[in-house]
Image (spheres, rainbow, N blue to C red):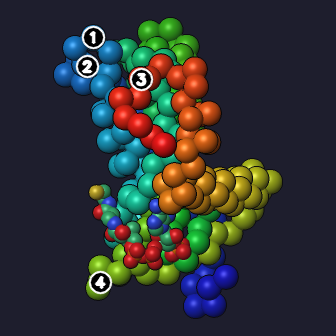
Amino acid sequence: MSASLSARPASFSRVTITELMIPSYANFGGKIHGGILLSMMDKVAYTAATKHSGAYCVTVSVDTVDFLQPVEVGELVSLKASVNHVGNSSMIIGIKVISENVKTGVVKHTYTCYFTMVAKGEDDKPTPVPPLLLETRTDVRRFVEAIKRKKYKSEYGAILKELKRTWDQEAISTMLQGQRCEVSLDIK
Ligand SMILES: CC(C)(COP(=O)(O)OP(=O)(O)OC[C@H]1O[C@@H](n2cnc3c(N)ncnc32)[C@H](O)[C@@H]1OP(=O)(O)O)[C@@H](O)C(=O)NCCC(=O)NCCS
């Protein structure tokens, strides 16, 4: 943990952005553009990260954004952001997205995604951020889950790198069996 910066609780930077989905946000199918929701996620992640760090922050990575159900015009979308994990200059922001029918008050669906933001100093280089003060069991669970996700992401990256480096013909042929593709070159 950083010696010079005092820890800040997640509650210090927790933030919610709520917006009504208006017709100009719709795609050609009449549903809300995924890009509109991504832009809102980016804004709320930026706000939480900037509040926590007190520095200018940039988006580095976006994890597990799955649009499993469409959001309709006229729904009220709320994005609740919380700093889940803090590294040296990076922060993982958990964002819970809730879509509500304003007429009935029924919450249609919710999902969670994770943005990694990095704080930058005046020199445009990554700068240390305050540690996270874990005050509740939920804070601890989210921090530990983030450690696990970072670990799996790094292992996944290593697997893909190895696949590219070794070009294991047998493994590649096995993986392609039963897939909906045709190979028009000799991969041997
Ligand atoms: C992200 C960026 C600051 C990294 O700069 P760098 O000089 O490589 O710095 P580092 O390697 O020290 O990485 C800084 C932090 O980012 C983290 N990081 C870097 N790449 C990452 C990735 N793909 N996923 C998650 N975290 C990442 C590092 O783990 C490190 O975290 P830590 O300080 O908590 O340990 C730099 O690449 C950048 O400015 N990218 C553009 C970001 C931007 O403009 N985003 C807007 C959208 S276009």
Q: Which residue is mark 1?
A: 29
Residue at left 50%, top 31%? 66
Q: Which residue is mark 4?
A: 122
Residue at left 49%, top 37%? 65
Q: Which residue is mark 3?
A: 182
Tell me if mark 4 has few (under 14), some (14-19) or many (20+) residues whose alpha carbon lies within 10 angstroms of its own.
few
Q: State whether label 2 is within 8 Å of ligand 1.
A: no
Mark 2 and 1 residues: CB-CB less than 8 Å, in contact?
Answer: yes
Real-space CA distance between mark 1 and mark 4, rounded to the nearest whole angstrom: 44 Å
Real-space CA distance between mark 1 and mark 3, rounded to the nearest whole angstrom: 32 Å
Mark 1 and 4 residues: CB-CB less than 8 Å, in contact?
Answer: no
In primary-sequence order, the first of circles 4 and 3 is 4
In primary-sequence order, the first of circles 3 and 2 is 2
Secondary element type, mark 2: loop
Is residue 26 positioned above or below 96 on the image?
Answer: above
Pair 1/4: label in front = 1
Q: Which residue is mark 2?
A: 26
In primary-sequence order, the first of circles 2 and 4 is 2
Query: Which amino acid type is marked by label 4?
Result: Glu
Left or right relative to 150: residue 46 = left
Is residue 18 positioned above or below 157 on the image?
Answer: above
